[in-house]
Amino acid sequence: MSRNINELLNTVIANSGKWYENVSSEVQEFLDGIEDLIKQGKEVNAVTISDILGEQFGIKITPTSVRNWLREIKKK
C-alpha cells in the first residue's frame, strides 16, 4: 500500500498550539476553577483532571500534559 508522505507530514503538524488554548467555554470554565483552587493553595491531582477531561469533555490528554499545565499555572 502506497502512502502519501505529504499527507502524513501534514497530519503531524500542530494546528492549535497548547492543548488548553483552544478549548470550549465549558472546558475553560473547568480549567479556571482548577486555577482558582491552586491559587487558594489546594493541591490538585493531574491524573484525576486528565480522567475528567476525557470522560466528561471528550478531551484525551495525558496526566503528564496536565502536570505541565499545572506547573505553568503555579508560576503565575
Image (cartoon, rainbow, N blue to C red):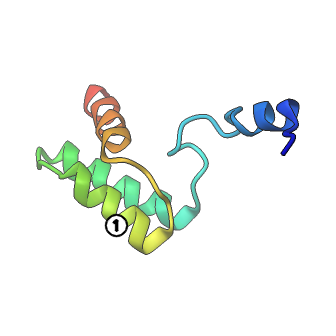
Give residue 17's position: percent from left, percent from top.
61, 34
User: Furthest residue to the top?
Assistant: 75
Secondary structure under tag 1 reads helix
Residue drawn at x 47%, y 57% as measured from the top left: 60
74 in relation to 54, above or below: above
Q: Nearer the viewer, residue 69 or 59?
A: 59
Question: With 55 as the anchor, is 36 left or right in this view?
Answer: left
Q: Quick one: label 1, few (<14), some, or many (20+) residues within 10 Å?
A: some
The quarter of the image holding the C terminus is: top left
The mark tally for this picture is 1
Residue at left offset 29%, top offset 57%: 49
Q: Is residue 18 left or right of residue 2?
A: left
The kind of residue on which mark 1 rests is: Ile
Residue at position x 61%, y 48% from top? 22
Residue extending farthest to the front is: 1
Residue 65 location in percent, x, y?
38, 40
Q: Position of residue 13 (x, y in %)?
A: 71, 32
Q: Quadrant of the N terminus?
A: top right
Looking at the rendering, which quadrant does residue 4 occupy?
A: top right
User: Closest to the observer: 45 or 63?
Assistant: 63
Residue at numbered disc 1: 52
Res. 21 image quadrant? top right
Left or right? Give the position of 54 relative to 2. left
Q: Quadrant of residue 23?
A: bottom right
Residue placed at 42% from the left, 74% from the top? 56
Q: Nearer the viewer, residue 62 or 35?
A: 62
Q: Residue furthest bottom?
A: 56
Q: Position of residue 48 (x, y in %)?
A: 24, 60
